[in-house]
Amino acid sequence: MNFRSTRSDETVSASYALLHGLARDGGLYVPETFPEQVLTYKDLAEKSYQEIAATVLSYFFTNFSADERKEMIAAAYNDSTFDDERIVPLHSLDTELTIAELFHGRTLAFKDLALSLFPYLLTAAKKQEKEERDILILTATSGDTGKAALEGFKDVDGTNIMVFYPSEGVSPMQKQQMQKQEGKNVRVTAINGNFDDAQSFLKRVFTSEEVNAYANEKGVLFSSANSINIGRLFPQVAYYVATWVRLVDDGIVGQNDTFDVVVPTGNFGNILAGWFAKKMGAPIGRLICASNKNKVLADFFKTGVYDMNRDFYTTDSPSMDILLSSNFERFLFYVAGGNTDRVAQWEKELQETGKMQVSPEELAALQAEFSGDWIDDDETKAVINHVFNDFGYLMDPHTAVACGVYMNFHKEGRLPHHTVVMSTAHPYKFPPVLCQALALPASDDPFTMLATVSEVTNIALPQPLADLRQKPVRFADTIEREAMKDAVLSFVDTISDRQKA
């Protein structure tokens, strides 16, 4: 399987796409030929998560042998990386709604499902490409990607990672996770700005001849751990397929039954992976894009207009505080029927005016498969309270956004099938929101708040968070957006000096 750019006829191998992340023309890589309707329940019944992942990824990473893929998957998904042998356990709230828990990895977020595997894919791709330079992973995060990427790549030989996050745009626990990150090859920096600022800067770095020439001279190659990289995106398809198989295995739906999916959505990678799973054969009916007050995506699926000319809000669901969803470009490629000139024009319009629009015919086709809606912070906390008090189930604010949107659709009779909410993070990553939602006393110390929540819910503090309390802060710097380039070049110099030592 080769991969092509969304903006031109540039075509590369899977190993090249894994290694470089972004296409040379600034586009994103997509499969040259997408494997449609290749999966059946009969072939996947009763298989483990690892076996399902191996099947799914065999269609995309054909540059690796079956044994190589199996070895990488075994190293990524085991009892030292996930606390549940099912990897993605299901929890049924009632006969009509199932929660797919994607947060049982090392950093308690759905990003672990891809970022536990991605370092193995990248290391193998580097070997295939005979690349001798050190890799510098540059990553922007709105909360969970940063920690998951840092944990995945810490102390991996020949690889370094630098993460930027908005100083006031992540939860206190997410900040603790990143500021206290261990590893000799990692660096974390907060910025006075939002996630879009960080992500836009990194895209400019990847396409800057000046910055890349400097890094090359120092023996460093830039890559990415954001879902713009195929090594992040396609492993996510596996958990949608695994969810389908488990629903049937457990008798929740029949072999030929359609089910709907609600996804809390920010950068569009998670819901795009669900759509790819549907294209491969999973019987997913409607994909519902759940947003917070930064509802640019929910509005798009109602109007066909993607308009970033609006206020940016810092919300209780920070991983969704995004106006420029980078994976949306991949989606537009398929909306345009593979017309790269049209995609390039749309992206130019977004860059120059902050706005683009699909045709009425294209919107009608999209609305046959996608819907969008949103709820605000007060509604989010009300959902957390309601679900805990009525069902004894505690959810994080992103999952609560998805659940709230589900409730609105359900009341209106717009979900005729069994529905799955993709739960993206452990609730304990968001102690202030939990205390507000459950009417518990707040504190400046997130661990004190979690102790209070634990007393009420009888949910123990997960070990990865408990271990944080005694660890020292390593990365406390906050810089202006304009200083990000110098910060990257400074780390390049550090890597180069380390190579010479």
Image (cartoon, grey):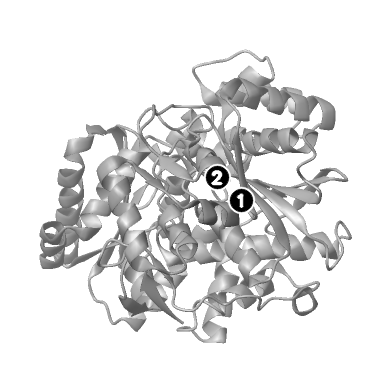
Tell me which residue sits at (83%, 67%) in the image.
Answer: 256
- Name the quadrant of the C terminus: bottom left
Question: Is 14 on the left or on the right of 58, as rendered?
Answer: left
Would residue 22 be seen by someone viewing this image from the given angle?
yes
Q: Position of residue 315 (x, y in %)?
A: 49, 27
Q: Would residue 400 be found to the left or right of residue 133 on screen?
A: right
| Viewer-side residue, 344 vs 189 | 344
Looking at the rendered structure, the kind of residue marked 1 is Gln
Percent from the top left, x then y, of residue 141?
40, 44
Q: Secondary structure at mark 2?
A: helix
Q: Residue at x 28, y 82 (%)?
A: 130
SS type, badge 1 = helix
Which picture quadrant has residue 399? top right
Mark 1, residue position = 367
| Residue ID for mark 2 | 301
Distance, label 1 to label 2, CA atoms, is 7 Å
In which image quadrant can residue 435 be found?
top right
Q: Is residue 219 left or right of residue 162?
A: left
Observer-nearest of 431 and 41: 41
Relative to 359, is 192 above or below? Answer: above
Tell me: residue 193, above or below residue 276: above
State if disc 2 and disc 1 touch (CB < 8 Å): yes
* Kind of residue sitting beneath label 2: Phe
Packing grade of label 2 (10 A; few <14, some 14-19, many >=20) is many
Residue 274's place in the image compared with 480, above or below, is: below
